[in-house]
Image (cartoon, rainbow, N blue to C red):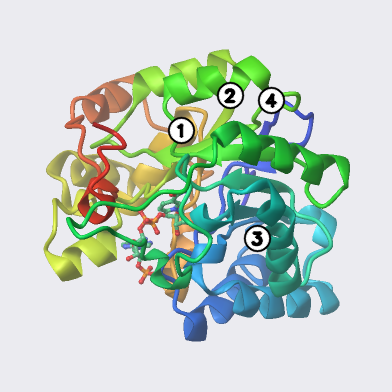
Amino acid sequence: MTGVSRITLNTGASMPSLGLGTYKSPPEKVGAAVAYAVGECGYRHVDCAAVYENEKEIGAALAAVFSAQKAAREEVFITGKLWNNAHAAADVAAACRQTLSDLRLDYLDLYLMHWGVAFPREAPVSGGEPLRDENGVLITSPVPVRETWEAMEELVRSGLVRAIGVSNFTAPMLLDLLSYAQVPPAMNQIELHPYNQQTRLLEFCHYNKIAVTAYSPLGRAGVVKESGEGPVLTEDAAVCAIAKSHGKSPAQVLIRWGLERGTVVIPKSATPENILANSAVFDFCLSKEEMDELAKLERAHRYLDPYERWRVPYFG
Ligand SMILES: NC(=O)c1ccc[n+]([C@@H]2O[C@H](COP(=O)([O-])OP(=O)(O)OC[C@H]3O[C@@H](n4cnc5c(N)ncnc54)[C@H](OP(=O)(O)O)[C@@H]3O)[C@@H](O)[C@H]2O)c1
């Protein structure tokens, strides 16, 4: 990986623009994926979450990479996420400490509120499955986002995390948060790819000095192809044509598209060839014409729409 780009958070910290995603990275594979990405391919950023149920395996891999001196802890940017069932003020620090213990770290570089929705404490983390009422509608817990955020601010003060942010926040949710935050959010991690570009939200975040991470940047290629649910972004004709003209793969073009827009991009892979290929995105650029071509692909398609599981029209 050459010339990895970085962004600067509103905390002043520097964050690598490319990270390894770990959602749906099976526990038996994720350790090897992280070890290969960080130890051999030059990745310096790993995106984790308690609900992915693989933090222990990631922690073991990171510990091995650090002890083999393939990378130093300070060089690797590690993000964690607070799951929805630990939003109550009394639960936030414990959830963060559990993640730190699983990841075998003494601090996180960034800790995100995974969703702006509180589940009851007893909702199982396993599989992220929520509790639903007799009509299949999500059972929520009456915890305001403000309570959760203020508890997360304490994590910064106590040194457990270096920065805090949110994920899946819309502009009105961010405006509300900004009205009281003592520590403003450093990041909003949202679904971004050419089929769901959210250009206005991106502009809004950047204007308010909130960095943006693009999740599902490949349109969840493997998962979608296997399930047949939704368009396969890596097979889009326009993406493929641009890839061909650069001698690159569709995935590399999609990652580059996110980098060109000033976002952090976190493609997930547990396949060594893909992990390596996804890091080879710093030796080419997309032209304005190519970005314009990709802009035409917008279709407000979400690969992850919580309505399907929660019956809450979170994004409308
Ligand atoms: N904050 C949130 O609510 C949220 C939600 C979703 C995701 N995320 C984060 O964002 C990360 C990325 O999103 P994602 O996992 O949903 O999807 P993604 O990164 O868009 O796609 C991952 C899929 O693409 C395949 N893939 C990877 N590299 C490829 C390549 N070069 N060519 C073809 N296929 C390739 C992977 O298979 P292989 O493993 O076999 O390579 C996997 O099936 C997650 O892992 C997670 O860390 C956050």
Q: Which residue is mark 4?
A: 184
The amino acid on which the numbered mark 2 sits, given as a three-letter code, is Leu
**Farthest-out residue, right:** 158
Q: Give the vertical position of 173 relative to 258 (above or below).
A: above
The amino acid on which the numbered mark 1 sits, given as a three-letter code, is Phe
Numbered label attached to residue 177: 2
Q: Give the residue displayed 27% in from the left and 35% down from the top.
A: 196
**Farthest-out residue, bottom:** 28
Q: Which residue is mark 1?
A: 169
User: Which of label 4 and label 2 is nearer to you?
Assistant: 2
| Callout 4 touching callout 1 (CB < 8 Å) | no
Which class describes the residues within 10 Å of circle 3: few (<14), some (14-19), or many (20+)? some
Mark 1 or 2 closer to N-term?
Answer: 1
Numbered label attached to residue 42: 3
SS label for mark 3? loop
Q: Position of residue 171 (x, y in %)?
A: 44, 21
Distance of label 4 from label 2 (alpha carbons): 8 Å
Observer-nearest of 107 and 147:
147
| Callout 4 touching callout 2 (CB < 8 Å) | no
Mark 4 or 2 closer to N-term?
Answer: 2
| Callout 1 touching callout 2 (CB < 8 Å) | yes
Distance of label 1 from label 2 (alpha carbons): 10 Å
Observer-nearest of 166 and 224:
166
SS label for mark 1? loop
- Is label 1's Cβ within 8 Å of ligand 1? no
The amino acid on which the numbered mark 4 sits, given as a three-letter code, is Pro
